[in-house]
Amino acid sequence: MRILALNASPRRDGNSSQLLAAAASGATASGADVSSVFLADQVSGVLDDCRTCRGSDGRCTIPDEYESLLLDQVVPADGLLIATPLHYYGMAARLKAFFDRVFCYTSAAAPEADRVLSALPGKRIGLLIASEETYPSASLGLVHQVQEIARYNRQHLVGVVYGHGNSRGDVANDPRRPLDQATELGRTLFTAPATDYHFDTPRGHSVWGV
Ligand SMILES: Cc1cc2nc3c(=O)[nH]c(=O)nc-3n(C[C@H](O)[C@H](O)[C@H](O)COP(=O)(O)O)c2cc1C
């Protein structure tokens, strides 16, 4: 299975990076083929008005590496590990741009729309959040937004790890051991249950089948 690990922090060596490295190591240990991307290397532009920046061939002309990131790395991935710092109670802006700009590649005018649309469903997602504050609802808006994006794309949000810290690497001092939790999330990305029932979903009395 292929996993793409996305670090949305502006800091290459910050807390999100540590969480993501731990998750990637768990995924690699489970046999997954993991590649990592520091989002700032590939995404510098935000979504603009497609009428002004879509080329005559239908391609997005925002001058950065987003297209190759999406088409060559996100599309073929079976799973995404996404690490972001909490910024003003939401995701880092570059991650929002990453999600927003999928729009440019799924509209009818986009030459690769069918390929992108058919690759969206089914991906399993692990979310890793670095934040300074520890109160449970600080990250709620961010988690809810990623959950809704996953639902909209028919993907599965498998789990969320919260790591608390501020200075670079501080997350390693968090007594809740988020790095261990991240390793476990990576290890089980394709095996952990990720259920979302409807009233008629076939199921037994025990979640765990015992
Ligand atoms: C612009 C900005 C906004 C932030 N907003 C919050 C916040 O709303 N709540 C919080 O707990 N921490 C906030 N933080 C702190 C970071 O989430 C925290 O330092 C995190 O560990 C940084 O992760 P990183 O090292 O991966 O960048 C903010 C930091 C920055 C730079």
Image (cartoon, helix red, strand yellow):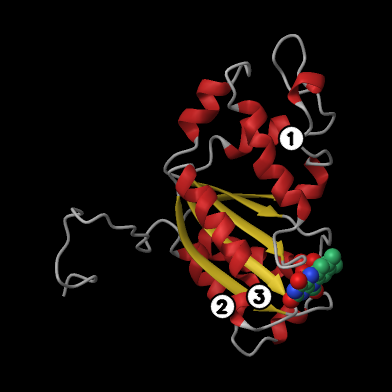
Which residue in the structure is indicated by mark 1?
A: 66
> Local crowd at mark 2 within 10 Å, few (<14), some, or many (≥20)?
some
**Quick check: is the Cβ at mark 3 less than 8 Å away from ligand 1?**
yes
For the residues carrying marks 2 and 1, which lies nearer the camera in this image?
A: 1
Residue on which the image places disc 2: 180
Task: Please say if 118 is above or below 186.
Answer: above
Check residue 138 in the rendering and tell me which mark sits there, or answer none.
3
Which residue appears at 77% of the width and 65% of the height?
87
Q: Earlier in the sequence, mark 3 or mark 2?
A: 3
Q: In terms of sequence position, does the residue under pointer 3 or pointer 1 come before the other?
A: 1
The one nearer the camera, 178 or 48, is 48
* Residue drawn at (67%, 52%) of the image: 6
Ligand 1 occupies quarter: bottom right
Secondary structure at numbered mark 3: helix
Q: CA distance from mark 3 to mark 1?
A: 29 Å
Q: Nearer the viewer, mark 3 or mark 1?
A: 3
Q: CA distance from mark 3 to mark 2?
A: 22 Å
- Indicate the amino acid at tag 3: Ala
Q: Is residue 14 visible?
A: no
Q: Position of residue 95 (x, y in %)?
A: 71, 51
